Amino acid sequence: MPPRAALSWGSLPLSPSATRSLIPLAQQNAATPAVSYTSTRGIKSTFGPKPDRFAHHPNKPALNSTSTAALERKAHSTPLRTGLLALKRGMTALYDPETGKRTPCTVLQIDRNEVVAHKTREKNGYWAVQIGAGQKEPRNVTRPLLGHFAQAGVSPKRHLAEFKVKDGSGLGVSVGESVGANWFALGQWVDVRGISRGMGFAGGMKRHGFGGQPASHGNSLTHRAMGSAGGSQGSGSRVLPGKRMAGNMGNESVTIKNLKVLQVDEKNGLIVVTGCVPGPKNQILKVQDALGKPWPKGPMSNAELAPVVEAAEPVEAAAATA
């Protein structure tokens, strides 16, 4: 059977009835003007708007990213006044005369603390007091530091540290003034920060307190070994970040919080606090008002310090009366 020829619909003649039905529709469309419109597409959601995940509370505005807002967020945990630099002299114990209770304590010495500089919000972006302690030979100090000390009117210092304060009221101690042990009051709480003793390379049991593996029952030469460092397929066949392993122990910044001041010796520059503090003997430490306790009603400047009344010696008192 021969193939059929392709049918061309455009070559077919229109019937009279079809032509008559198309003419009125074309006239109607020509008489009606075209209306232009813009379609808007959207998605109708059944859920309400979610709160900003960067806001600290759904009902409060989002936190600002400015430096002023950052200082306001830290204002509640920023001390009102400066701290001091102290040297760890050793540990001892004090006995309560009423209860007889023995309290271990640490003796700290305030060694020639002087204000070297002030850091202001307008110039440096924050409020702070720079404290210098100790003494250093001028020939062992670089020229930029010598100029820095000369501008403040103080002798070259061995140790320098900054203590951030809440606002300008914490800059009550002027540059060049000396601050002694009576900056801290008897019975107040302080935080002590310093570098801990370096232990060198230590294993997992000493560094992290691991219990170790069994001493017998088939265990050979792995009694103090760390054990497995990670899983296989379940954890990605890798060692997870933060895994506690053997390594360098100590020699890091440690803060001991909420130590009570038991004694203050202004004449010798000594402060006795409860408990232990980080570092070996003669370690430099930063002593500041405790953040976890109410702010003490301490002095904000040297003018507000209570005068130190020194008791006269018995021999001098007897000579004076005679």
Image: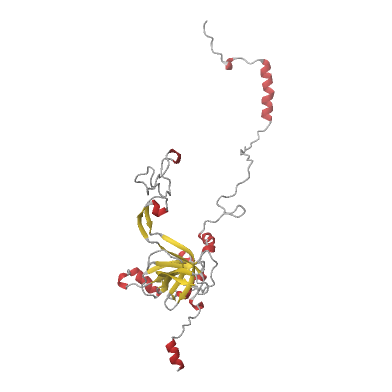
Label tally: 0
- Residue at 35 percent of width and 68 percent of height: 144
Quadrant that contains the C terminus: bottom left
Residue 11 at x, y = what percent? Answer: 58, 15
Which of the pair 198/14 is nearer the observer?
A: 198
Which of the pair 240/9 is nearer the observer?
A: 240
Question: Colour scheme in the image?
Answer: secondary structure
Q: Is residue 210 left or right of residue 29?
A: left
Seen as rendered, the residue at the extreme bottom is 322
Query: Looking at the image, can residue 119 be seen?
Result: no
In the picture shown, does residue 77 fall above or below 38?
below
Residue 283 at x, y = what percent? Answer: 38, 67
- Residue at 67 percent of width and 21 percent of height: 22
Residue 131 at x, y = what percent? Answer: 42, 70
In the picture shown, does residue 319 fall above or below 133?
below
Q: Is residue 5 left or right of residue 247?
A: right
- Residue at 40 percent of width and 54 percent of height: 207
Residue 287 at x, y = what percent? Answer: 45, 68
Query: Looking at the image, can residue 257 be seen?
Result: yes
Seen as rendered, the residue at the extreme left is 139
Seen as rendered, the residue at the extreme front is 217
